[in-house]
Image: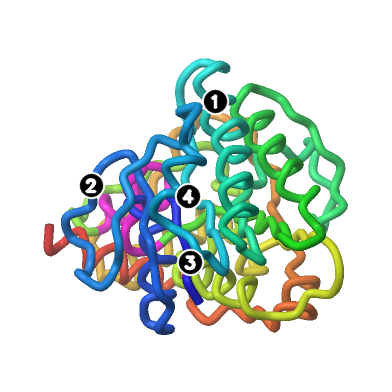
Amino acid sequence: MRILVTGAGGHVGGAVLQRLYAEGHSLIALGRNPLPSLSPEIEMLQVDITSPDAAEHVLQKAPPLDGVVHCAACQTGDAEALMKTNYFGTKQLLEAARKAGASRFIYLGSMSYLRRPLELPVTEVHPLDMAGPYAASKYLGEWIVLQEEKELKGISLRISSPVGAGLKYRRIFRFFVEKALRNEDILLHGQGGRRQDYVDVRDVAEAVQLALTKDTGRGAALFNIASGRALSNLALAERCIAVLNSGSEIRFSGEEDPDENMAWQISIDRAEAQLNYVPRFSIDDSILALAGELEQA
C-alpha cells in the first residue's frame, strides 16, 4: 500500500512510520519540517497542512494513495491556532485523500473530549464534552473524518495515553522514569490513587496497521485504542522503581489530588472484535523502552 503519514516526527507518528515501514508499505512522511533521519526509501513531503493550498501541494507529489494516517496535531496555542491545525488541517487532508484515490483515512483521536465524570467502562459511545479549545478542535477533526463512509472510509482511533520510546512530553510517565533512573524520590499527591490507561506506542502503531488492512464493515468506524488496564499513580511509581532496580523511594506530599478517584477504565472490546487488536506490550516493556532511550541520550 502507498500511505501518507502526517506527524511522522512525533511520538506516535514516528512509531507508526516504523511499523508501516517494517510491513513493507510504500511511505510518504508529511511534515512542516524535514526529517533527516528517515530511511532513504521513505519519501519526505514538506507541507504545512494549515495553508490554504495544502491539498494542492499534496496532490502534486503524493498520488496515487491507498491510505492516509493523520497523526499530526496541535496541542498548545490559542483557539484559532488549535482549530486551524486540528480541524481545518484535517479537512485539507481529507480533500487531498479523496482526490488522490485513497480508500482509508485513519485519524488519531484522543480521550480529551469525553465528559467527566467518566462512565465506566469507557466505550466508544461515551458522552462527549468539548471543554476547552483543544478538545473541541480534536473532536471536530474526528467528526469530519467520520462523515467519510463511501469511496474514502474514515476511521478514528481514540488513543488513551501513549507511552514508551520516543515520549518527549515530561508528564507523569516520563517524569517517574527519569526520577527512577536518577535514584531520586518520587513524590505523590493524595494516596496516588488516580488510575490511567497507558498504552505502549508500539501497540498504537499496530492498531494503525490493522485499521488500514482489516475489513471493519460498511461506513466509518471508531475504536478505542488502549491497553485495557488502569494503573494507579502509586502502582506506576512502584513499577518504575522495580523494573529499573532503582534506589528511589516513594513519598507523599500531604497535598490532596483532585483526581484521586478518577479511573480511566477503557473498553477495547470493539477493537478486539473488529480489528483483532490485542495489546502486546506491558507497562514494564514501556518503562524499559523509554529508560533505554533516555540512558543513550
Helix or strand or loop: what does disc 3 sit on? strand
85 over 194 or under it: above or below: above
Which class describes the residues within 10 Å of circle 1: few (<14), some (14-19), or many (20+)?
A: some
| 36, 201: nearer the viewer | 36
Who comes first in sequence, dot 4 or dot 3? 3
Who comes first in sequence, dot 1 or dot 3? 3
Amino acid found under the numbered disc labelled 4: Leu
Residue 87 placement (x, y as % from top left): 62, 33
197 over 80 or under it: above or below: below
Snapshot quadrant of residue 22? bottom left
Q: Which residues are magenta?
A: 164-180
Residue 213 placement (x, y as % from top left): 63, 79
| 168, 190: nearer the viewer | 168
Q: CA distance from mark 1 to mark 4?
A: 20 Å
Who comes first in sequence, dot 2 or dot 1? 2
Residue 100 placement (x, y as % from top left): 56, 57
Which mark identifies residue 34?
A: 2
Residue 19 placement (x, y as % from top left): 41, 75
Which class describes the residues within 10 Å of circle 2: few (<14), some (14-19), or many (20+)?
A: some
Amino acid found under the numbered disc labelled 1: Lys
Q: CA distance from mark 1 to mark 3?
A: 24 Å
